[in-house]
Image: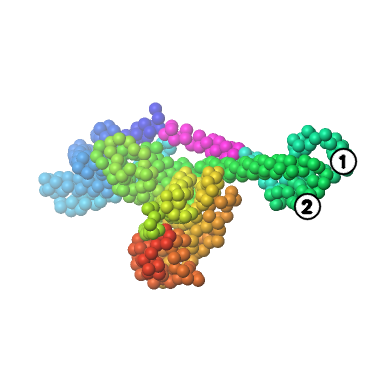
């Protein structure tokens, strides 16, 4: 017999013993205890039988008849309320018990035509019963929930440290592989003396081996041919061909000088091509090392991102389960997690007790009351639940909310814009704006910028850090190896819990923060992504306030101003715009820009605007 059954038997025993509690000829413990336990959904028939049995042992017959009727009326009222509303709150049960006591006391006193002063005892008894239910209900819920850890939960708790240790071990392995690849990385800019000697031997082997004077030219180390070949290769390396002085001197020693020069150029070009491929291989090794580092970070992050605090917050989880039950929702497998930023995340399986549809928003209110924090449904959580069990996630609500807007113009005579953008909401209360401008315009530029945005989105949704996502995207562009495949990256990541905004810029135009008429400019001087393996990311951070706006633009917007300081002009334009609508703000920016270009669009233009407000 499990622990829950033993607790249920203890409640039946308590139902017998409460009949001994007498106060001024009244027995308020009987209806109060009965109503509190009745709403806990134990075996209600057995509860009624044991309560009546206790009254038969300790309560006079007349009082037993009265309280039996009170129990029946109380139980009937709670069941009718549950049938009509598919739920029953604790205060409803308390009110039903108190009202039953008062009404039956009044009815009994009226029929017996006794001293009306006894009616006041009925009033006091009903108040006492109501208060007892309100106090006893949460205590009973805690009693039933405490220590009642399902078998599956215990197993999960035992597996969790082992799972985290495995991830940490995997992360260390990937870090080790990354270091091995990084140690191999040693780019070569020039040929080493050994490689020069090999080229010299290859040239002599192809030209001099068939010459009758070969033994004479190469028999001694003091032969001038060694120095001439060395100077010849250096001349080809610097000038792309043999210098006139070296060629004339070689002609005075060797009748096959033209053949030697021609062969030397071919050998050198082949060696130069091999060197380029070798450096490209080393570069790819560096890319792989970065990707292994990123995988190691993800594993480490997964091992520590969520901390299961269910075992330490049993009271809160019991309160959540009770609140959900009051709304007609049966829940199990409840886990409470704490994120790295200290915010809570609740995961559970739930189903409607009565088979009716229950909105997840209503459940979120119950969860908020139980955890004593504002909780909202997770991003991908369904909106309704029914009789079938569903997995639900509730996240701690953010302090801020944001609205975004965009305005775009395509270059004159172009069919498609080369700019791409994204508004992304991540787990953990982050809102990310990303903007990319592909080099040039048209379909090719659009394809490049779309690839950049899609890669960043996928990496961020997978849980990578912002810098890691950008570097892996850059690695993919470098490996792709298409000449001229460059794109800018402009990203703003807003923490909706704190209002802190992180800016990441790679070759992008300036970003602006508008606070009323004041406008701050955040500029960048880095190169676009896809040019070099080693990427320079310019990062800055700002604390935003209620009513602030963040505005991202492509260089096509500022370049059209044709003024010495286009950033200052953009600050003046934004400062003069008076609207709280992000989309209208973006449109008005482009309208002002077109006034400066006489309605012409010499380049693709995109403006992203996002406003932040406290909830």
User: Which secondary structure dominates the residues rendered in magenta?
Assistant: helix
Q: Depth check: 602 or 566 in front?
A: 602
Query: Mark 1 falls on what kind of element?
Result: loop
- Quadrant for residue 583, please give it: bottom left
Q: Is 171 displayed left or right of 517 in the figure? A: right
Q: For the residues marked 1 and 2, what is the alpha-carbon distance in whole angstroms?
A: 23 Å
Give the number of the disc on residue 221.
Answer: 1
Point out the tag, 1 or 2, that comes first from the N-terminus.
1
Q: Depth check: 451 or 140 in front?
A: 451
Percent across and percent down for residue 430 are 44, 53
Q: Residue at x 40, y 45 (%)?
A: 346
Q: Is 196 displayed left or right of 418 in the figure? A: right
Q: Is 114 displayed left or right of 57 in the figure? A: left
Query: Mark 2 falls on what kind of element?
Result: helix
In the displayed structure, would residue 151 be above or below residue 78?
above
- Quadrant for residue 226, please give it: top right
Q: Which residues are magenta?
A: 150-174
Q: Residue at x 48, y 54 (%)?
A: 439
Q: Badge 2: few (under 14), some or many (20 or more) residues near its Cα, within 10 Å?
A: few
Location of the N terminus by quadrant is top left
- Quadrant for residue 199, please give it: top right
Give the number of the disc on residue 245.
Answer: 2
Location of the C terminus by quadrant is bottom left
């Amino acid at each position: 017999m499990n622990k829950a059954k033993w607790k249920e038997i203890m409640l039946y025993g308590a139902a017998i013993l409460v009949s001994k509690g007498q106060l001024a000829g009244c027995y308020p413990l009987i209806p109060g205890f009965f109503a509190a336990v009745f709403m806990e959904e134990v075996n209600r028939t057995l509860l009624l039988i044991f309560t009546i049995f206790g009254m038969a042992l300790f309560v006079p017959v007349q009082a037993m008849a009265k309280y039996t009727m009170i129990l029946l009326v109380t139980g009937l009222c709670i069941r009718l309320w549950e049938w009509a509303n598919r739920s029953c709150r604790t205060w409803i049960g308390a009110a039903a018990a108190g009202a039953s006591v008062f009404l039956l006391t009044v009815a009994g006193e009226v029929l017996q035509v006794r001293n009306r002063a006894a009616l006041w005892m009925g009033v006091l008894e009903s108040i006492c019963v109501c208060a007892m239910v309100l106090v006893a209900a949460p205590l009973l819920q805690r009693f039933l929930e405490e220590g009642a850890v399902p078998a599956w939960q215990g197993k999960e708790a035992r597996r969790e440290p082992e799972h985290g240790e495995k991830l940490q071990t995997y992360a260390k392995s990937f870090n080790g592989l990354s270091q091995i690849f990084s140690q191999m990385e040693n780019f070569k800019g020039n040929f080493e003396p050994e490689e020069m000697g090999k080229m010299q031997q290859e040239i002599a082997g192809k030209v001099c081996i068939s010459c009758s004077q070969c033994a004479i030219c190469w028999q001694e180390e003091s032969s001038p041919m060694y120095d001439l070949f060395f100077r010849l290769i250096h001349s080809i390396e610097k000038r792309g061909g043999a210098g006139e002085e070296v060629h004339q001197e070689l002609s005075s020693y060797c009748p096959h000088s033209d053949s030697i020069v021609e062969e030397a150029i071919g050998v050198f070009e082949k060696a130069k091509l091999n060197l380029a491929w070798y450096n490209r291989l080393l570069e790819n090794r560096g890319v792989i090392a970065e990707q292994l580092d990123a995988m190691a970070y993800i594993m480490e992050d997964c091992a520590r991102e969520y901390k299961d605090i269910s075992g330490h917050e049993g009271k809160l989880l019991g309160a959540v389960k009770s609140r959900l039950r009051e709304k007609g929702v049966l829940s199990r497998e409840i886990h409470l997690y704490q994120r790295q930023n200290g915010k809570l995340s609740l995961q559970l399986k739930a189903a409607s007790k009565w088979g009716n549809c229950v909105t997840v928003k209503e459940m979120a209110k119950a969860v908020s009351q139980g955890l004593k924090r504002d909780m909202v449904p997770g991003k991908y959580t369904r909106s309704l639940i029914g009789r079938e069990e569903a997995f639900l996630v509730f996240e701690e609500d953010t302090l801020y909310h944001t609205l975004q807007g965009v305005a775009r113009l395509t270059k004159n005579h172009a069919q498609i814009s080369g700019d791409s953008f994204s508004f992304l909401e991540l787990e953990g209360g982050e809102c990310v704006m990303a903007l990319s401008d592909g080099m040039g315009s048209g379909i090719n530029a659009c394809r490049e910028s779309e690839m950049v945005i899609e890669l960043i989105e996928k990496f961020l949704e997978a849980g990578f850090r912002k810098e890691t996502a950008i570097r892996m995207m850059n690695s993919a562009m470098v490996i792709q190896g298409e000449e001229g495949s460059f794109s800018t990256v402009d990203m703003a990541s807003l923490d909706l819990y704190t209002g802190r905004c992180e800016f990441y810029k790679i070759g992008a135009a300036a970003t602006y923060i508008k606070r009323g008429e004041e406008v701050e400019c955040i500029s960048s001087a880095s190169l676009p992504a896809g040019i070099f393996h080693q990427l320079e990311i310019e990062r800055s951070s700002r604390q935003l306030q209620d009513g602030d706006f963040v505005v991202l633009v492509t260089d096509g917007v500022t370049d059209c101003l044709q003024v010495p300081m286009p950033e200052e002009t953009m600050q003046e334009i934004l400062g003069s715009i008076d609207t709280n609508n992000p989309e209208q703000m973006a449109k008005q920016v482009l309208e002002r820009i077109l006034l400066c270009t006489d309605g012409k669009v010499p380049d693709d233009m995109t403006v992203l605007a996002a406003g932040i407000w406290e909830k």
